[in-house]
Amino acid sequence: AITLRTDLSVSCVTHLDLETPHLCSSHCAIMELTAHRPPALSCRPANGREPTRAHATRMASSAHSRRASRSPLCSVNGSGWALRHPAPKGTLSSGSAGRYPCQPLQAIATKDLPRTDDDGAYGVFRLEYDLDARNPSETKTWKRVINVAVTGAAGMISNHLVFMIASGDVFGKDQPVSLSLLGSERSRTALEGVAMELEDSLCPLLREVRLGIDPRKVFRDADWALLIGAKPRGPGMERRDLLDLNGQIYKEQGQALNEVASRNCKMLVVGNPCNTNALIGLENAPDLPRRNWHALTRLDENRAKCQLALKAGKFYTSVTNMCIWGNHSTTQVPDFVNAKIEGVPAREYIHDDKWLKEEFTPTVANRGGVLIKKWGRSSAASTAVSIADHIRSLTQPTKEGDCFSTAVITDGNPYGLAEGLVYSMPARSKGDGDYEIIPGFHMNDWLIEKCKASENELLKERDCVGHLLPNATVAQCMITEDTMLPGEN
């Protein structure tokens, strides 16, 4: 390590991370402030690229591996980079959860600080931390920090979800996270309330919370983007109007993700109509993998498992290989043909085709509406749980003989579906965040007919939003039926 001092008496330990040799890191402690503008530290690598937040958090969570190999890299000049937040007076920091380890050095006040800084970092989450200095036995096996962006973050679904993420129930008990929460001008105050509760929850894995209303700031270096926010359906609004209104939101968010997110970011669209919103997003993000865009149909799958278990008189864990096909609408197809109960095909176990064909699907599709009538509010908690289930299905290996439902791009699908749609199909994962569509599901005439109807609906939705896609066309909206799910319109 090399120690540099400026006229501000800034002690800076700088080193080269040999695991990522194109980066550098500077950890500084302000010992004394003067009125003079100091020269800053230059931490630009030879290629001129600035360190990214993902790199910063990776270095912050792997301090132990860095100690063995440090070499000087920084120099003093007038236009370089230094640590965003100074450590407490008289101390020396060895890590930072900040956006960049190197940013322009500025003299700041030591009291009456605003709750958020220019980068959106909130409250206690602006402070530096040292993974090795505290509870080393707990943190030594932790993975690098991942960046998770959540939209609609002041809403009820997000309010349930972010605490599950912070506590390790979504990404794992060894996975530190940085949360970036996107709201709107109207929800800014409520967003701060969410951040205050996250502060008070004292979750060790939660290393940063950032708030913002600009998607290009909130999505920067995101490894996961959970896109929950969407406009509700207003009085007298046709479904085609909602497609256009929310489509514009997802066009902007797709473009923002394309510009600033991690190049392997995983996107999960929850805001309805989620299939077509996901299509709009992915078409406006040409530099991100199309297969990384998902629309949520896991809540439909969970509801279908529950109904089959009730009918069979078994606990829901006995239901496997349950898939939802198609659109997240009343045209969805809960697949009882390939589902199993206690390892036995569901049709053989239940012996009631009339119920399966005439009652099962409407019960699943209308579950949200029934819940609203009972409770007076939509299904926020179970939606948050299904988001967590979806993520775990991608980050944990799928059990042999099982599957999970996800609406993804149909390009190259094994079932002859029209390409260029986001359509729910059966998938499995090795637990690496990726997936494959499972081929070979039995498709009888009944299942083919229902799947085709949902495909046709998605084709019509795509025509309705043609003006929001690259190489825009005039929208030709031929939707005549209202197939929005009750409680989600």
Image: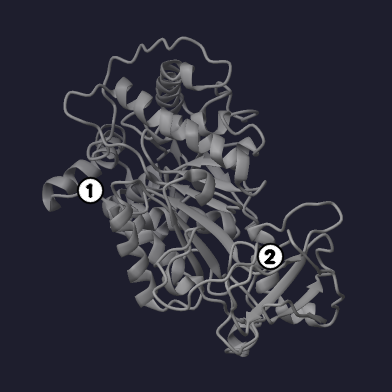
Q: Quadrant of residue 356?
A: top left
Mark 2 or mark 1, earlier in chain: 2
Q: Residue at x 47, y 41 (%)?
A: 338
Question: In the picture shown, does residue 53 fall above or below 94?
Answer: above
Instruction: Say what secondary structure mark 1 lies in.
Output: loop
Q: Is residue 350 visible?
A: yes
**Residue 408: which disc?**
none
Question: In the picture shown, does residue 395 fall above or below 183?
Answer: below
Q: Residue at x 58, y 67 (%)?
A: 98
In the displayed structure, does residue 446 sit left or right of residue 60? left
Q: Is residue 326 visible?
A: no
Classify the position of the C terminus by image quarter: top left
How many residues crowd mark 1 within 10 Å: few (<14), some (14–19), many (20+)? many
Front residue of this view, candidates 305 and 175: 175
**Residue 378: which disc?**
1
Q: Colour mode?
A: one colour
> Which residue is disc 2 drawn over?
102
Q: Amino acid at mark 1?
A: Ser
In the displayed structure, does residue 102 sit left or right of residue 84? right
Residue 376's spot in the image, x, y percent?
13, 50
Front residue of this view, candidates 464 and 53: 53
